[in-house]
Amino acid sequence: MAGASGERGRTGGKPSEDGSTLGMKIEQLSAFYGDFKALTDVSMDIQANKVTALIGPSGCGKSTYIRCLNRMHEVIPGAHAEGHVRLGDEDIYDKSMDPVKIRRRIGMVFQKPNPFSKSIYENVAWGARINGYKGDMAELVERSLKQAALWEEVKDRLKASGLGLSGGQQQRLCIARTLAVEPEVILMDEPASALDPVSTQKIEDTMEQLKQSYTVVIVTHNMQQAARISDYTGFFYIENMGDPGRLWEFDETEKMFSNPDRKETEDYVTGRFG
Amino acid sequence: MSQSSTEVARQSKPEDGGTYTTSVGVRHGFDRIFTLLLLVATCVGLVVLAVLLVDVALDGVPELDWQFITNFPSVIPEKAGILPALVGSLWLLALTSLFSVPLGIGAAVYLEEYAPDNWLTRLIEVNISNLAGVPSIVYGLLALGVFVQLLGGLTGGRSILSGSLALSLLILPIIIIATREALRTIPDTVREGGYALGATQWEVIRGHLLPMALPGALTGVILALSRAIGETAPLIVVGAAAYVTFLPAGPRDRFTAMPILIFDWVREAQEEYQLLAAAGIVVLMGVLILTNSFAIWLRNRYQRRY
């Protein structure tokens, strides 16, 4: 059942029948920008087929953390991470692991929509093509756009430029292209923060659908959003300026927002500080 | 004291008692003066260029006929033609493009996307900028020593190959710099989007960065080839003759080029040779416009896409 060094992705071109996917287990993850330690000793269990939200004040390492989960952090020159991040039972930071293969299995949607300078069709197809997709590409594109709740709006203009879409549509296009390479986990770094409320609602609805087939991790500044859509929540915090960020508390969302264990968590979720 | 509402924004009381001047007439005046000066600066360049071109065209176009293009140079001005020089220049253009474009774009991609940010890379960058300013005759001397003499067995000595290698070295920095600038304007979010889908660095470069950088790179290529086609000094040093009686058949053959023939004609005392030179210039400009148009068309094709 186990694939070799990150080979295993889903086969057959469709989400697996029972919708099951992999969870992640993070152990003692620390992240650095050069010598500066931005994140220290984070350990977390991310449940499969659930939405996990990461909240906390600005600058406490949430974005750094999520980028470590698919080894995008190390793309920045001088940046590195230490610790273990397991996808299923494989440590993605193991020496034998190829980051290129990891990033296909753990996809990412960025804060500011960044569709490619290509047609809508090509935006979705490109990732699948370079990953060697053999099959009906048009069908894959349609399926991905439908999963991202964008198909109805663009089905008549697939050859139009991806950059001509509105912000909310562009972000859904980015979700569609991530889905087209059939990841197991989808990471979202504040995906709706640059969007208007209507687009935000559409994206949140999409996430509700997505968790049936994927594991979703989302960083958000919007606590109401976290409370609405997530199953689990992690609160990040820094005590003093210049300290590395750490995971302060992690629990089921209901508990985190109604009866958290730690004072700082409670202060944050009740809005006593932002 | 009444003032119109456009004159004074608000009656503020700054602590140091300072005030603003309300009249903007003088400021608008300066605005107009400088706009005019900039316009004049532009026009001077354009007018001079237009005068030169018109003057050359008036002298040269009457001389231009099919005979002129297909004849060899001759001591008899009526029978003189530009054929071997035209063919030589076209050969040079083709070979120079072949060498300089892939090398230039490749070097730029390496420096911009792959090279680590260390002292060696910075040294290379500084030197490329410097090389862009080296006088062309120096490249000619370099080519004479390396391509003509040292590698003479390979290149055929004073051949088109040596000439085009000299020109390629000359224009390489222009292409590298233009392509690097084009790559720099591509935001990192494009690269991130590619990596996040599980793409390798080369896949991101080939799939996104090169297509997006192509318009800028082609602008550099246009500028570079325009320069190459007009260069005379390095070709003379490498050994292009003015009067040749044959057409080059291969890259290792001896050759001549249009700027050299034009230069030679200009130096003749007789009036007829001046007119021939003018006609030669018209042909040279024609080749230049054709080449540039092709490159511009290619650039537009990639620009219009998205």
Image: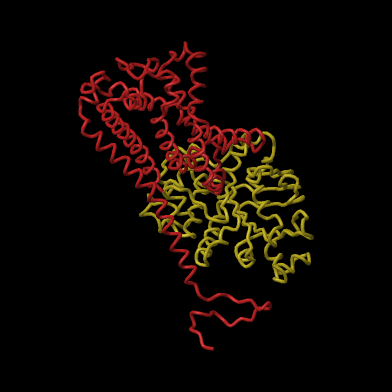
Chain colours: A yellow, B red
**In this view of the protein, can residue A16 be seen by the observer?**
no
Rendered residue at 62%/54% (across/down): A217
- Where residue A256 appears, as percent x and y from the top left, is 71, 64
Q: Nearer the viewer, residue A243 or B3?
A: B3
Q: Nearer the viewer, residue B53 or A243?
A: B53
A258 sits to left or right of A153: right
Q: Left or right: A207 with respect to A240?
A: left
Image quarter for residue B82? top left
Q: Closest to the observer: B302 or A115? A: B302
Residue B174 placement (x, y as % from top left): 49, 36
Residue sitting farthest toward the bottom? B1
Q: Quadrant of the N terminus of chain B?
A: bottom right
Quick check: A231 above or below B224? below
Instruction: Give how far across and how far down residue A254 sits, in percent.
Output: 68, 65
Q: Quadrant of residue B64?
A: top left
- Establish if B46 lies above or below A206: above
Q: Nearer the viewer, residue A182 or A109?
A: A109
Q: Identify the residue at image location x=52%, y=13%.
A: B150
